[in-house]
């Protein structure tokens, strides 16, 4: 505990802690105790947050949000960016997690069932190929496409995790138009903790 000399000196009155400047060049930082509601001089403060905010799920060092309101891929990516992230990268190390979380969602209101296929951040760029919506490269050694997919990269430029069985046990990728007007989808956001 890096207390300054003589500190803490009044735990019954000074119940809060601060990092105290003890030199004019800010090179010597030590702890000091202070009253909780010190009114003569307020202070700066340092916040710390652990885990994910409400509604998001932690996996590894990332937080994931499983959106069940229907949006186009573009709207979903905009939503995720507004929350400080992007549509999720369905990589080999998170595929089982994403699949099991999607399998646990209530699909009783999904008619037709493919309305609930959640968008991921997979994006096709003509002349370049697939990348993630955050601009990072796709690991081409893990691209779990459904049979016959992708089938139209010039038109269907976004990716989704597609339901291929009635019990949600087989999760594979499908390509879809970015702004699919006949049927929007659920989506998965991803951001750093």
Image: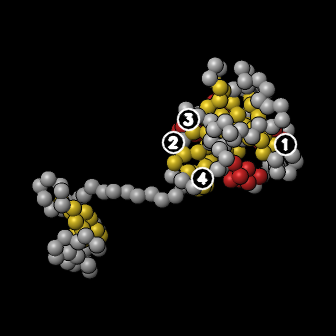
Query: How dense is the environment of label 1, judged by Cα within 10 Å: few (below 14), some, or many (20 and up)?
Result: some
Observer-side mark, 2 or 3, equals 3
Question: Quadrant of the rendered structure where residue 124 is?
Answer: top right
Question: Quadrant of the rendered structure where residue 60 is?
Answer: bottom right
Measure the alpha-carbon separation of dots 1 and 2.
31 Å
Q: Marks 3 and 4: CB-CB under 8 Å?
A: no
Query: How dense is the environment of label 3, judged by Cα within 10 Å: few (below 14), some, or many (20 and up)?
Result: few
Relative vertical location of residue 155 with respect to residue 72 in this rendering, above or below: above
Q: Which is more N-terminal, label 2 or label 4?
A: 4
Measure the alpha-carbon separation of dots 4 and 2.
12 Å
Q: Marks 1 and 2: CB-CB under 8 Å?
A: no
Q: Which is more N-terminal, label 1 or label 4?
A: 4
How many circles with numbers are drawn on the protein?
4
Q: Which residue is mark 2?
A: 84
Q: Which mark is residue 85?
A: none
Q: Which residue is mark 4?
A: 56
Q: Which mark is residue 136?
A: 3
Relative vertical location of residue 145 with respect to residue 47 in this rendering, above or below: above
Residue 170 image point, x, y percent: 82, 47
Q: Which is more N-terminal, label 4 or label 3?
A: 4
Classify mark 3: helix, strand or loop: loop
Relative vertical location of residue 105 with respect to residue 156 in this rendering, above or below: below
Q: Which residue is mark 1?
A: 164
Residue 129 image point, x, y percent: 65, 26
Observer-side mark, 3 or 1, equals 3
- Residue at x 73%, y 21% (from the top left corner): 155
Residue 44 image point, x, y percent: 27, 55
Classify mark 2: helix, strand or loop: loop
- Residue at x 69%, y 41% (from the top left corner): 142
Quarter of the image with the N terminus is bottom left
């Amino acid at each position: 505990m890096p207390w300054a000399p003589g500190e803490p000196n009044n735990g019954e009155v000074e119940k809060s802690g601060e990092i105290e400047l003890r030199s004019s060049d800010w090179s010597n930082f030590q702890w000091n105790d202070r009253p909780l509601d010190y009114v003569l001089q307020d202070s700066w403060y340092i916040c710390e947050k652990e885990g994910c905010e409400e509604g998001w799920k932690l996996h590894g060092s990332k937080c994931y949000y499983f959106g069940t309101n229907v949006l186009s891929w573009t709207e979903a990516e905009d939503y995720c960016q507004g929350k400080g992230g992007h549509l999720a990268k369905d990589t080999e190390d998170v595929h089982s997690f994403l699949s099991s979380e999607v399998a646990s969602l209530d699909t009783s209101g999904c008619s037709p069932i493919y309305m609930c296929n959640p968008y991921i951040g997979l994006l096709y760029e003509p002349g370049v190929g697939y990348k993630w919506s955050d601009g990072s490269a796709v690991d081409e050694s893990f691209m779990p496409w459904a049979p016959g997919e992708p089938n139209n990269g010039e038109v269907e430029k976004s990716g989704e995790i597609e339901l291929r069985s009635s019990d949600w046990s087989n999760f594979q990728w499908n390509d879809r138009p970015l702004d699919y007007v006949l049927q929007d989808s659920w989506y998965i956001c991803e951001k750093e903790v």
